Image (cartoon, rainbow, N blue to C red):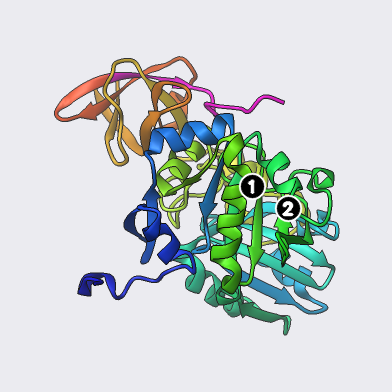
Amino acid sequence: MIAPAEQALKRTALNATHRACGAKMVDFSGWDMPVEYSGITREHLAVRTAAGLFDVSHMGEIEVRGPQARALLQHVTSNDVARLQDNQAQYSALMLSTGCAIDDCVVHRFVADHYFICVNAANTDKDYEWIAQCNSWGVEVRNVSTHYSQIALQGPKALGIISRLTDSNPGDLKYYWFRRARCAGVEGILARTGYTGEDGFEFYFPPAASAELWNTLLDAGREEGLIPCGLGARNTLRLEAGYALYGHELDEQTTLLEANLGWIAKLEKGDFLGRDVLVRQRAQGMPKKLIGFEMLDRAPARDGYAVCIDGKSAGKVTSGSPAPFLKKNIGMAFVPPAAAMAGREIQIEIRGRQAPARIVPLPFYKRPK
């Protein structure tokens, strides 16, 4: 029996499968999602050493089509869409005139007049409405999120597992490229992308095939250590890799430069939303800067904890948790740029005391080549 409070939650096509497998379910941005199956640490380590399978069907998909599709996306996103070739993707941000982002996203180019954007679940409707509002070019913009489930297979053994189930050689795909493909007989879009810091693939496909494809993948990879993973491990993995999470490191009050995402702000491409603010910040400086830190004692930092420098309040933790693979307690935080020096000691306020920490370079973890 589903409790009344749960009835309003959205569900992916794999919801019943997760529950049948004993996943611990939580409300994530209005979606009933698995936070863990066998434990966050075990799932995290499986992705670092073997492979993990994630249901990320809550993510949104927006299609942009028409002769002026590129012009619209050049205006509303920060990265340079003109650099994309057919079947290539890029990490980018949907911009506001303030230099801040309404969301971060991945833009995929099928052909010059057809693009496919993957956006965050909580922002899907907002993103679609914003792109439509900025559409002065008569471009067709559609929210096609209900047309797709999305599964992410991540880890050093992901390539070997998925190679046995696809109709083309996924090893030919370079990082951030994609193609139409069949996986276990299911037609979809196979992209060599992910959010864990490991090699891996994301597959977009019709929701009706979700349970069968999920189980087929798990069966195919079981002997190599593939296990189902929840959003808890997805979060600790992306934190180790130094990836931003919208609503934490990036939001509508934080510019791309402040969030260490200046590398996706292609100022040289010409005018786009917020470019003038970013140009000014690059020349004149900014009020805050994102840093990574590791704790110097055993206490873990958590999201929202205050950061102090020389005993004075200096910012807040945006993301903090134990790092299962690195065996450290790590986090990211905003501090004044003048204080953002690797090696500097800072303090994190934890239950009324100032726990010592040290600023370290990002990312915390890079996968071996």
Q: Which residue occupies the foreground of this view, 12 or 369?
A: 12
Residue at image x 71%, y 49%?
266
Q: Is residue 112 left or right of residue 151?
A: right
Q: Amino acid at mark 2?
A: Leu
Tag 1, which secondary structure?
helix
Q: Is residue 41 above or below residue 206?
A: above
Q: Tell me residue 29's x, y (percent).
A: 38, 62
Q: Could you tell me which quadrant the C terminus lies in?
A: top right
Q: Main secondary structure of the magenta part?
A: loop
**Residue 48 location, quadrant:** top right
In the picture as drawn, the residue positioned furthest to the left comes out as: 352
Q: Which residue occupies the foreground of this view, 51 or 241?
A: 51
Q: Which residue occupies the foreground of this view, 186 or 120?
A: 186
Contact (CB < 8 A) between labels 2 and 1? yes
Q: Quick one: label 2, few (<14), some, or many (20+) residues within 10 Å?
A: some
Residue bearing the label numbered 1: 220
Asked if residue 313 lies in the magenta stretch, the reply is no
In the picture as drawn, the residue positioned furthest to the bottom comes out as: 138
Residue at image x 40%, y 44%?
232
Q: Is residue 153 above or below residue 342?
A: below
Q: Amino acid at mark 1?
A: Ala
Q: Does the image show residue 197?
A: no
Q: Could you tell me which quadrant the N terminus lies in?
A: bottom left
Q: Which residues are magenta?
A: 356-369
Residue at image x 57%, y 53%?
277
Residue bearing the label numbered 2: 165
Q: Is residue 96 left or right of residue 235?
A: right
Q: Tell me residue 204's x, y (percent).
A: 65, 63
Tag 2, which secondary structure?
loop
Asked if residue 364 lies in the magenta stretch, the reply is yes
Q: How many marks?
A: 2
